[in-house]
Amino acid sequence: MVKKEYCFSCDKDVRIETKEKINTYTIHGREVKVKEKVGYCTKCHEEIIETNLNDNLRNCYDEYLKLYNLSFDKFKEIRESLNLSQELFSKVLGWSKKTVIRYEKAQSLPQQEYLYIYQRINKNKQEFINILNERKQSLNKQEYYKILDRIKVEINPKTINVFLYMLKDNPKTITQIMKNFFALDFFCYQKTGKPLTSLNYAHGTYGPIIDKQAAIINLLTKQGILEMIVKENDNIVFEVKKMYDINLFSKEEIEIMNTVKNKLRNKSAKKLTEWSHKFKGWLDTKQGEKISYKYAKYLDLDNNW
């Protein structure tokens, strides 16, 4: 069957011939070039607006999404890589479930701010965890831990072994763990130019804390790295039963861990909090703000007690 389309110039259905053409479109302020198959009238040779306009529009959107290293298929892949349903995924991001469905079915093109979020998550799963913790108050406790459990937060083996080494025969409360690890990484950065663990630290009410501490402590507890013990005075401490792998550390790193472990061993949570409140990195930042390792030079394990 000969393919026919309506030609506005000829005002009738005409036979068409198809040619490839590169068209330029502007979407959300950005230009995209799309190679399309365009129909032309065989009589007047004018371009025909074909009935497959939706296909051309989809191709245009696909090219636009490539500017962000994304695609409609990628939206679903990103969500499924987190092992989350459309409902839970949308709850964390503060979107409606219908919005996520439309994006995954190519029924709607995300606004630029949403594309940036997909882009962040696609590059690094930790970004989704950051968003989860930023929006923690909008979720109930059951939902929060259900999501954490599903997305399988990862901590590198060396960091896990630092926990095993620092808490071996040295049980600590949450506050003490926060201050010991803060001191360890900033002291290590001071001596070697890099932290010992993969952790970051933020300004907390009681001094520097491990950034995203709830997610990390919860994961380590579920993995059996940390064991929670309730003491007679109702204080909760964490201890370890597993043995660390000493081969993961250099001689200098072992010396650094021993130095921090010994200097802070008998310091109470209250004493550690008071000491950490004098640290310039804590004083210069606001609640929830990350503390840069540039402040490592101000860490003093011997004074300000």
Image (tube, rainbow, N blue to C red):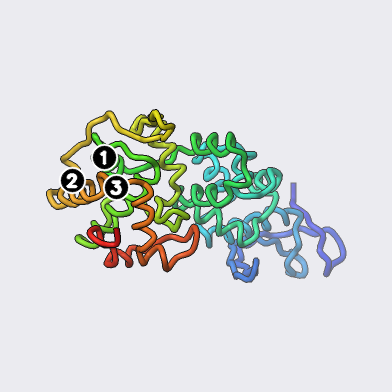
Quickly name the residue at label 2.
Answer: 249
User: What's under tag 2, amino acid-wise?
Assistant: Phe
Which structural element holds mark 3?
loop
Q: At 77% across and 70% down in the image, what residue appears? A: 44
Residue that numbered label 3 is attached to: 267
Q: Is residue 9 above or below residue 222?
A: below
- Secondary structure category for the residue under label 2: loop
Of the image marks 3 and 1, the number of the one nearer the N terminus: 1
As measured in the structure, the alpha-carbon distance from the residue carrying label 3 to the one carrying label 2 is 25 Å
In this view, 116 is above or below 217:
below
User: Which numbered tag is attached to residue 211?
Assistant: none
- Callout in the foreground (3, 1): 3
x and y percentages locating residue 175 in the rendered image: 39, 46
Q: Is residue 112 left or right of residue 213?
A: right
- What residue is rendered at 37% in x and 56% in y? 274
Name the residue type under label 1. Answer: Asn
Tell me, for residue 161, which label it has, or none. 1
Q: Residues within 10 Å of mark 2 (few under 14, many from 20)?
A: some
Whether pointer 1 and pointer 2 mark residues with C-beta atoms closer than 8 Å, the reply is yes
User: How dense is the environment of label 3, judged by Cα within 10 Å: few (below 14), some, or many (20 and up)?
Assistant: some
Q: Amino acid at mark 3?
A: Lys
